[in-house]
Image: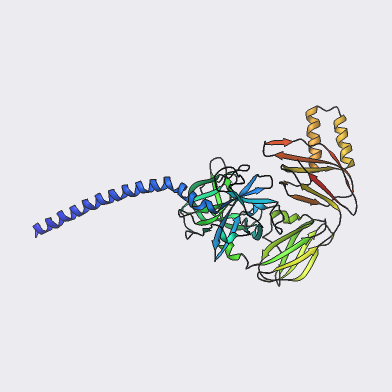
Amino acid sequence: MQSGTRGVSRRAAQVAAAAAILVTVLVAACGALSVGAWNRMPEQLLDDVSGSIWGVFNKCGHTRGTAFVVEHGGAKHLVTSLHVIRGYRVDDPLDGQIRVSRSESHGRLRPATTTTLKDVRVAYADDVLDIAVMTAAGIEELPSLHLSREAGRRVQVFAVGLAQAKDYFGISITDGIVSNPNKEIVVGSRAFYQTHIEHTAPLAGGQSGGPLVDMRGRVLGVNAFSYGGPTLHLFYATPLERVLDAVGVSGRLEIRNTGSARIKEIYLTPENLERAEIDKLPPEIGRVNGLATIRFDVPDGRYRVELVTEEAEPKVFDDVRIDPGKTTTLEYSNKDYGLRIANAGCNDILGIALLNPVAQSLLEQIERSDWPDEQKAEKAEALIMSAEILRGNPLAPGQTWVEWIVEGDYDMYVFTFAPSVGEFRVPKPRPLRIRDGELTRVYVAD
């Protein structure tokens, strides 16, 4: 009995030793495989996904961000972050305003190696989630990515996007992990939360709108923004699947502002419910430029639509019906004169100031005063910036701004920034006359 027990114990010890050796070998092998896979994976992934990655450029060739083609539900979509294309008339074809291009070589965009998509249009936009879903001619023939099955899990991820450069198509890739797959954060200044994917894959300028992919190159979300300080920086992507599920399903409300008076706020009141401000509005829609069309998706149903404008009383549309997959159009027009400024150059317009005769007289008094030059400059700058009308909304090349301005004579100052040389341009005043009944058009060409 003892002999048998000793034999069993001996065999058990041998099995345990063999198992230990096997575990050691497997751990070593897995470790070697893991390191090797980690070293090769970014390069392999870049080769796998690069054919579906596109650059978004303005008309002067400066990078605005990244877009990519993804297939879902049997259809292909061109996806980017909404802020990458914000400021353009998204109801019109974007051709001529922005270029969605890619190069077969990871270098400069040369005619021989560059493909530019045609008839690019926005099919769906969600400002709260910062996503735009677009269509383009021939999109069904383009290479595409697929959605990941790793949604909601803490997995290794890679952020893919365009290097920030002029006329350059250099795709960059960074790696990290999903630290929180369902991070609820406040979006902008609004007091409500939205779910984003929090991850640690660094995002560089130009990667906005690019895909966050798993180890198989499948898409988890759209890289949108980063947040943090000197000691901690985290990055956020918007989950994509639920956005694609909504394309073509929600109803759409279109508001055409054909005058030059500004719409300050837009409210929707669903039938039998209390008045509530629309959540899914881009920030600038809170102060809609005149001569513009705004489209956004809302649940189907009947609504009371209220436009808070520069008029004394709000403009109200009762019993507005929104049907699934259809567009309902409302038109607002008041005041037929004002100022329309178009950025016809390749520099960013950071600010525009209009000085009326009273302000011009004050500026002249500052110049004639006995104050030190530094004090003169400070007071002049304060006076000019108090008349600034862009309100912190810079105009990129190709964008326009419409403002209702009281008739009269003005001195206009245009503050520009040249991205190509990193240079701010000191403005010189130019005379401007606003007349009742006329829309004054100003084209700024650098």
In the rendered view, would you say 422 is above or below 127? above
Answer left or right for 171 relative to 345.
left
Name the image quarter holding the N terminus: bottom left
Question: Of residues 215 and 268, which is closer to you in this image?
Answer: 215
In the rendered view, would you say 222 is above or below 300? above
Name the image quarter holding the C terminus: top right
Q: Residue at x 85, y 31 (%)?
A: 367
Q: Quadrant of residue 137?
A: bottom right
The percent position of residue 65, horizontal first and vertical second, equals: 61, 48
Q: Residue at x 79, y 30 (%)?
A: 375
In the rendered view, would you say 92 is above or below 208? below
The percent position of residue 127, horizontal first and vertical second, equals: 65, 57
Answer left or right for 20 relative to 276.
left
> Total marks drawn?
0
Whether residue 177 is visible: no
Answer left or right for 365 relative to 202.
right
The percent position of residue 75, horizontal first and vertical second, equals: 57, 64
Answer left or right for 98 relative to 430.
left
Question: Of residues 208 and 446, which is closer to you in this image?
Answer: 446
Q: Quadrant of residue 60?
A: top right
Whether residue 14 is visible: yes
Question: Of residues 425 and 321, which is closer to you in this image?
Answer: 425
In the rendered view, would you say 278 is above or below 37? below
